[in-house]
Image (spheres, rainbow, N blue to C red):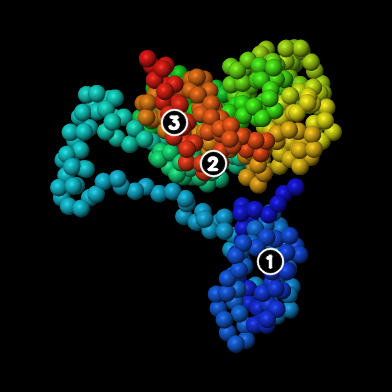
């Protein structure tokens, strides 16, 4: 199912004979092993050789090596250098700090720093709320992780998590003008994480928790919300839930079903799955059945933590037990945030008429999307190479833009639901179809619409 993509793009610099067939031989060699060429540039030309840069997409690091070896195997061809374009992008990091004010002379320095800055310090000491007006706090978010659940890669630790947090910060700036900064903590102790965030909170207008393993993430978020006077948002939970609820509203519009009549199976009851369930329940679905690695979650199941016990108490009205395959029978919707390759087209065929399948495990979903499409009316994934990509970038930049603009001191389910509706509303009736239930992450209308919805919901709460 994987296809060549830009995540494994390489540029191979090769020397080749200056024959008329050289270009064709090189491109054919890449094609024979399944590479996709995106650029072919002659960088040097000599009487006895040409030097060419071949840029192509691969499926994996091993596949990139296969492409390189296929080129090197051609008669008279020598590979000079192979550059991994993803690693090149990360050299030196992806973000930087830049000054917002000019420092051209002594007058500027006197206002920005001593002696003038002392007056600003005194003003904040007298009225701490002025920090939101007179410092970076008004537009700055901490992206906090302990590196315990990095993407789908597991417990890699804080240093290895830093590239993800940098990327998150870059997305905040790109899509919503929010200044975010990575805070990778060298501890996975719940108490230390809570205390560390509490200690750095004066600098920030919001906290975005990221890639912290369940179930610790639930306690960390809940206790920080109680302790801090700024919004705390665990994106793996709530960003995913916002996008799923918004996308599901539109998917059900496509198939002419109501959420209040829909029976929904949620596979995966960790951070994302639990948050999806909690937000969905505000919309009164007919039923939600949760499934984890041990099967259907139901009351009376043994060895459940507090989060799982809550899920068991608030879902599965019929009290059924069994496997994921059992849960799918007669279901209107499948939402997966779990593991790859859990079921096939034959299980989709047992679902209700015109089923909706959100297979969001990444990079390999719970079912091959092409298999799901044999029976499902709407299919969504977390991947960028299939229609209907459910991506948190649709949510978190606009959510924090709205929270910061409202100078919110917390975040509520009403704000999350408002964000979900804003995402859904971007796709009007003229554009809605089975292959387009959510807007593109590059749609410039998304972040402002989400921000406006969150800002209004925050205003309604404070009013």
Residue 50 percent coordinates (x, y): 61, 79
Secondary structure under badge 2? loop
What's the distance in space between the residues labelled 2 and 3, CA to CA? 15 Å
Do we see residue 288 in this rendering?
no
Residue 215 versus residue 245: which sits nearer the camera? 245
Does any portion of residue 374 appear in the rendered image?
yes
Q: Which residue is mark 2?
A: 441
Q: Upstream in the sequence, badge 1 or badge 3?
A: 1
Disc 1 packing (10 Å; few <14; some 14–19; many ≥20): many
Residue 214: percent from left, percent from top = 61, 28
The quarter of the displayed image where residue 57 is located:
bottom right
Q: Is label 2 in contact with label 1 (beta carbons under 8 Å)?
A: no
Dividing the picture into quarters, in which one does residue 207 lie? Answer: top left
Give the residue pinned by disc 3: 451
Q: Residue at x 64, y 82 (%)?
A: 18
- Spatial distance from mark 2 to mark 1, Cα to Cα? 33 Å
Q: Position of residue 345 (x, y in %)?
A: 82, 35
């Amino acid at each position: 199912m994987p296809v060549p993509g830009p995540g494994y793009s390489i540029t191979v610099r090769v020397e080749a004979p200056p024959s008329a067939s050289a270009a064709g031989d090189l491109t054919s060699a890449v094609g024979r092993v399944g590479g996709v060429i995106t650029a072919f540039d002659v960088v040097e030309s000599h009487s006895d050789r040409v030097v060419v840069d071949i840029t192509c997409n691969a499926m994996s690091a091993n596949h990139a090596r296969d492409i390189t070896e296929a080129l090197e195997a051609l008669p008279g061809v020598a590979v000079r250098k192979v550059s991994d374009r993803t690693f090149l992008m990360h050299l030196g990091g992806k973000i930087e700090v830049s000054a917002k004010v000019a420092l051209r002379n002594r007058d500027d320095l006197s206002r920005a720093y001593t002696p003038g800055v002392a007056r600003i310090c005194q003003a904040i000491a007298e009225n701490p709320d002025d920090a939101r007006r007179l410092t970076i706090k008004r537009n700055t978010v901490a992206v906090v992780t302990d590196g315990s659940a990095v993407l789908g890669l597991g417990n890699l630790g804080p240093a290895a998590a830093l590239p993800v947090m940098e990327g998150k910060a870059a997305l905040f700036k790109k899509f919503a003008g929010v200044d975010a900064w990575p805070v990778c903590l060298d501890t996975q102790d719940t108490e230390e994480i809570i205390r560390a965030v509490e200690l750095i909170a004066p600098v920030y207008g919001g906290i975005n928790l990221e890639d912290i393993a369940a179930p610790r993430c639930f306690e960390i978020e809940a206790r920080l919300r109680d302790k801090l006077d700024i919004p705390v948002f665990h994106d793996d939970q709530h960003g995913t839930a916002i996008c799923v609820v918004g996308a599901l509203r539109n998917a059900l519009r496509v198939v002419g079903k109501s959420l209040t009549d829909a029976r929904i199976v949620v596979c995966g009851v960790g951070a994302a799955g639990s948050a999806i369930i909690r937000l969905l329940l505000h919309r009164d679905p007919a039923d939600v059945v949760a499934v984890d690695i041990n099967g259907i979650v139901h009351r009376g199941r043994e060895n459940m933590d507090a989060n799982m016990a809550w899920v068991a108490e608030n879902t599965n009205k019929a009290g059924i037990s069994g496997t994921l395959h059992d849960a799918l029978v007669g279901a209107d919707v499948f939402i997966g945030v779990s593991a790859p390759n859990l079921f096939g087209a034959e299980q989709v065929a047992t679902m209700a008429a015109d089923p909706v399948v959100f297979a969001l495990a990444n990079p390999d979903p719970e079912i091959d999307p092409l298999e799901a499409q044999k029976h499902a009316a709407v299919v969504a994934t977390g991947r960028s190479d299939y229609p209907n990509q459910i991506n948190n970038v649709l949510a978190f930049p606009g959510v924090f833009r709205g929270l910061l603009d409202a100078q919110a001191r917390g975040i509520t389910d009403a704000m999350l639901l408002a964000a979900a509706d804003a995402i859904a509303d971007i796709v009007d009736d003229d554009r809605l179809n089975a292959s387009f239930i959510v807007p593109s992450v590059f749609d410039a209308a998304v972040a402002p619409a989400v921000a406006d919805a969150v800002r209004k919901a925050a205003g309604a709460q404070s009013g």
